[in-house]
Amino acid sequence: MMRRILAALATSLLIGATVATPAPATSAPAWQNAPTSWTNPNGGLPRITALRYATHPGFDRVVIDVRGKLPSYRTHYGARFYYDGSGALVPIRGGLGITFNPAYAHRNDGTSTYTGPRIARPGFRTLKAIAFTGDYEGYVNFAFGLSCDGSTRAPYRVMRLHEPQRIVIDFKHC
């Protein structure tokens, strides 16, 4: 009788250990030097709410907070960036731009839901400047001033993270 109890206990411990084992973490995407895009077929109308940034060993990071489902996005390199609607030149050196569509950063009454910086100059190793360039007709845009060995084209990667919803952009140190 005691053997059966011990065998049942050992079996349940093994099953419990197997069930409790976490899945391996997914690795970050590879660094890239070309424009990229991602389309969310179930995107809805997400709101961009905030942006924060920090430097880490080997890369600089930007995190863009989203309320609702993650929006589709497209990245592009540019020597200059312009504010949506007005067409005025953004006062940062060139680098990478990201466009979210469909997305918005305002409420129905027109008040902004975006609480991050309009323009910031962190002066990190690769990420030199950040600009919120617009929330116009379903498009939300940001520009990132970069410096990588004298070039404004730096290797980067974009990650989509959940709970909370956010887009993370890493810029590799050169």
Image (cartoon, rainbow, N blue to C red):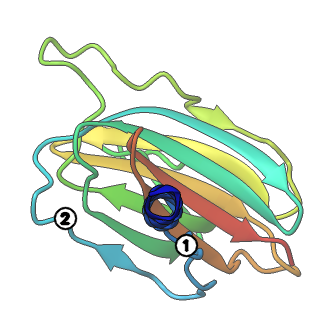
Type of amino acid under label 2: Asn
Q: Is residue 169 left or right of residue 55?
A: left
Q: Is residue 38 above or below residue 100?
A: below
Give the mark nearest the N terminus, 1 or 2. 1
Picture coordinates of residue 80, whole percent (x, y): 56, 64
Q: Which residue is mark 2?
A: 40
Q: Is residue 151 left or right of residue 136?
A: right
Q: Is residue 53 left or right of residue 74?
A: right
Q: Nearer the viewer, residue 6 or 145?
A: 6
Q: Is residue 96 above or below residue 145?
A: below
Residue 73: quarter of image: bottom left
Residue pictured at 56% horizontal, 69% vertical: 25
Q: Nearer the viewer, residue 133 or 12?
A: 12
Q: Quadrant of the C terminus?
A: bottom right
Picture coordinates of residue 145, whole percent (x, y): 68, 59
Cα separation, mark 1 vs mark 2, equals: 25 Å
Neighbor class of circle 2 (other Cα within 10 Å; few <14, some 14-19, many 20+) is few
The answer to whether residue 91 shows anywhere in this view is: no
State if disc 2 and disc 1 touch (CB < 8 Å): no
Disc 2 is placed on an element classified as loop
Which residue sits furthest front? 1
Q: Quadrant of the N terminus?
A: bottom left
Residue pictured at 57% horizontal, 43% vertical: 131
Q: Which residue is mark 1?
A: 24
